[in-house]
Structure formats: C-alpha cells, structure tokens
Amino acid sequence: MRGSTQTAPAPPLRILVGCETSGVMRRSMAARGHDVWSCDLLPA
C-alpha cells in the first residue's frame, strides 16, 4: 500500500536491566508487554 502510515505492532522484546535498585524500569517495560529480567543491586 503506497502512502500508508500504519505499521504492524512490534513483537515483545527480551530485556535485561542491570544494576537497577528500585525495579521501576523492569515494571515499566513489563507493563508494555515485554519479557523483562532484572539483576538488582538491592531487593525490589
């Protein structure tokens, strides 16, 4: 389709967040449907 601005939704990403202390980034990405793992410095 020429001139179409619609795109297919992107598949979920697999994300590793390192050196996080609060879990905020992990929860934010998980809320968007991504597979997120975190290696925290402190328990979240």
Image (cartoon, grey):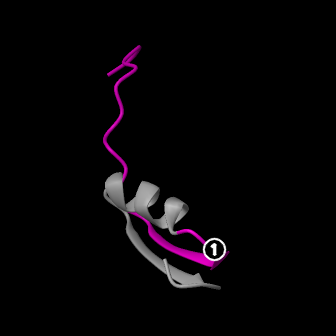
Q: Is residue 27 above or below residue 19?
A: above
Among the 4 quarters of the image, the one containing residue 1: top left
Q: Is residue 19 above or below residue 3?
A: below
Expressed as whole percent of the image width and height from the top left, the position of residue 23 reads: 51, 69
Among the 4 quarters of the image, the one containing residue 27: bottom left
Comparing 28 with 44, the one in front is 44
Mainly helix, strand or loop, the magenta region?
Answer: loop
Q: Is residue 35 visible?
A: yes
Question: Which residue is denoted by mark 1 in the rendering?
Answer: 20
Expressed as whole percent of the image width and height from the top left, the position of residue 25 reads: 53, 61
Q: Residues within 10 Å of mark 1 (few under 14, many from 20)?
A: some
Farthest-out residue, right:
19
Comparing 4 with 31, the one in front is 31
Label 1 secondary element: strand
Left or right, 20 with respect to 15, comes to right
Expressed as whole percent of the image width and height from the top left, the position of residue 7 reads: 36, 33
Residue drawn 35% across the image and 51% down it: 32
Q: Is residue 39 above or below residue 31?
A: below
Q: Is residue 13 above or below residue 1?
A: below
Expressed as whole percent of the image width and height from the top left, the position of residue 8 reads: 31, 40
Farthest-out residue, top:
3
Q: Callout 1, which amino acid?
A: Glu
Q: How many marks?
A: 1
Residue drawn 52% across the image and 80% down it: 38
Residue drawn 43% across the image and 65% down it: 13
Left or right, 8 with respect to 20, comes to left
Asked if the magenta segment contains residue 9, the reply would be yes
Among the 4 quarters of the image, the one containing residue 22: bottom right
Left or right, 31 with respect to 40, comes to left
Q: Is residue 11 visible?
A: no
Asked if the magenta segment contains residue 34, the reply would be no
Span highlighted in magenta in the image: 1-22
